[in-house]
Image: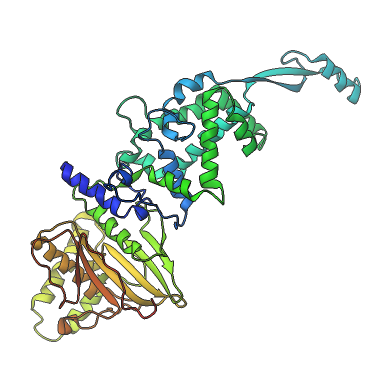
């Protein structure tokens, strides 16, 4: 487990880039809102310049009230409401709804003689086996229960869409513990599921909707406001929450201050043993904050695109690790190297032919011995950070930042980071399968289109990179990409 000092440092990393970090929805843990970590500094104002902002707001709405002990109608939050739902939902109000149906060949329920007489008057006294009968059902049609049902269905839809991966892997998403796992009492997600599926009132409403699609209708703002005045707390609180959801998330003219309040309520960060995932995100969000017009993307475990934006001449795309598509390819096929080895001048028994033979034979032998598909590449990698600058009209590559992140101040370990960084620079190729950098073994420089950066923790002693074709940036420093670009 990390020390308290280390945990505090990690939380402070989030606080330092809190205006962007609220988009992180991947695996990790929940931390206090950065306003509690900033030691009197101004409270962060999360950016609303987010593609799919409603997705981020929906998840944060679901998490609202993690540290709130009881429901506050002036400051409505979801989790305090859900913690008392199981006990209160047993006492929901019901109205008796009478349904009339025509029975043939038998009587199914009490006969409504007035309706039966009216049936005969309209159709003639031709079928003496036809009767109109009544069937009373506990159908909840009062507005309060419709409001409650819509709120619960809305919460369920967040799990079915934005949080499907978390439901499948609850151990990885500890920030959802009140919903998926609980230290004391029952998690909230099973309570939500059970209420919608098993509660008689919710089942009656669902059955009515299935029988007559659309009969429930959407809840109007007028109905929500009327339920806010009801005497029963469960309905009143549900109305307050549903009103907040529609105002902040569904409305086209939501209050920016309230949207930011929803986003500030909970922050999430990765919880890896080394802190490397968090450190990578910290540097990516630091780069984003160097550009005022970046459009953020929700950061999930399945989405590598962190942000994209444009100016008059260029398009920018910022990716995190594991990116496998784009203008550059970070792999060297075995077939390419085989051709080079066969045609290269010099000693055919030298180091490079032997290294190629070792790689090629290892792949082939593993296929024979273990029925494992042979590797198609002799080298493949991916930088921790890739920032593309593309021509806005043609999409062609103008510049690229390749970043390697090392959550360390150990110089020997950082040396390996420099080697990895140079592998990406020297071995990346374009769409024509041509290496982007020409003759690095001869020139020792970097292509003008490439910026290579090693991002680190603070290193003891002096760090000198002025004469190098790469930059070494320590925590606490800032880095602005493409500063010398002529169109910025």
Q: Residue furthest bottom?
A: 345
Residue 25's spot in the image, x, y percent?
A: 37, 48
Query: In the image, what residue occupies the spot 45% across and 20% down?
Result: 87
Place residue 364 in its image quadrant: bottom left
Residue 122's spot in the image, x, y percent?
A: 90, 25
Figure quadrant of the N terminus: top left
Which is more toward the observer, 153 or 282? Answer: 282
Residue 163 appears left or right of 274:
right
Q: Residue furthest front?
A: 40
Place residue 105 in its image quadrant: top right
Which is more toward the observer, 183 or 238? Answer: 238
Residue 300 appears left or right of 441:
right
Residue 111's spot in the image, x, y percent?
A: 77, 14
From this viewpoint, is residue 218 visible? no
- Image height check: is 388 above or below 219? below
Which is more toward the observer, 283 or 378? Answer: 283
Query: In the image, what residue occupies the spot 35% across and 64% down?
Result: 318
Residue 93 appears left or right of 370:
right
- Image height check: is 49 above or below 142? below
- Image height check: is 94 above or below 47? above
Place residue 400 in its image quadrant: bottom left
Residue 51's spot in the image, x, y percent?
A: 46, 57
Residue 113 appears left or right of 264:
right
């Amino acid at each position: 487990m990390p020390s308290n000092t280390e945990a505090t440092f990690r939380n402070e990393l989030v606080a330092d880039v809190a205006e962007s970090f609220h988009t992180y929805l991947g695996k990790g843990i929940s931390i206090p809102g950065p306003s509690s970590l900033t030691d009197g500094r101004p409270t962060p104002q999360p950016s609303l310049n987010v593609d799919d902002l409603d997705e981020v707001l929906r998840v944060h709405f679901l998490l609202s009230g993690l540290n709130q002990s009881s429901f506050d109608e002036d400051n409505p939050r979801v989790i305090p409401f859900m913690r008392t739902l199981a006990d209160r939902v047993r006492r929901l109000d019901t109205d008796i709804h009478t349904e009339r149906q025509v029975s043939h060949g038998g009587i199914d329920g009490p006969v409504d003689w007035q309706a039966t007489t009216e049936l005969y008057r309209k159709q003639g006294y031709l079928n003496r086996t036809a009767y109109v009968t009544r069937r009373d059902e506990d159908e909840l049609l009062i507005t309060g229960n419709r409001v409650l049902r819509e709120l619960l269905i809305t919460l369920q839809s967040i799990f079915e869409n934005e949080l499907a991966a978390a439901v499948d892997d609850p151990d990885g998403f500890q920030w959802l513990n009140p919903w998926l796992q609980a230290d004391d009492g029952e998690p909230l997600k099973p309570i939500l599921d059970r209420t919608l599926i098993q509660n008689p009132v919710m089942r009656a409403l669902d059955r009515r909707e299935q029988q007559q699609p659309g009969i429930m209708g959407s809840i109007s703002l007028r109905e929500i406001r009327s339920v806010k005045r009801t005497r029963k707390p469960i309905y009143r609180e549900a109305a307050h929450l549903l009103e907040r959801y529609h105002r902040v998330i569904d409305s086209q003219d939501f209050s920016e201050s309230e949207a930011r309040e929803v986003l500030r309520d909970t922050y999430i960060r990765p919880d890896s043993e080394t802190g490397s995932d968090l450190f990578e995100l910290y540097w990516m969000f630091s780069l984003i904050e160097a550009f005022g017009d970046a459009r953020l993307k929700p950061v999930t475990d399945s989405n590598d695109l962190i942000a994209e934006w444009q100016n008059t001449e260029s398009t920018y795309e910022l990716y995190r690790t594991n990116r496998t598509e784009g203008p550059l390819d970070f792999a060297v096929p075995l077939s390419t190297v085989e051709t080079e080895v066969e045609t290269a001048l010099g000693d055919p028994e030298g180091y490079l032919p032997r290294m190629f033979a070792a790689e090629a034979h290892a792949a082939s032998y593993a296929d024979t011995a273990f029925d494992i598909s042979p590797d198609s590449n002799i080298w493949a990698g991916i930088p921790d950070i890739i920032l593309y600058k593309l021509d806005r009209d043609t999409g062609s590559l103008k510049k690229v930042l390749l970043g390697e992140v090392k959550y360390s101040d150990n110089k020997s370990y950082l040396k390996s980071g420099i080697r990895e960084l140079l592998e990406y620079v020297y071995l990346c190729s374009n769409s024509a399968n041509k290496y982007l950098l020409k003759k690095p073994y001869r020139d020792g420089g970097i292509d003008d289109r490439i910026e290579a950066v090693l991002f680190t923790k603070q290193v003891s002693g002096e760090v000198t990179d002025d004469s190098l074709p790469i930059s070494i940036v320590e925590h606490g420093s800032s880095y602005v990409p493409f500063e010398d670009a002529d169109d910025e």
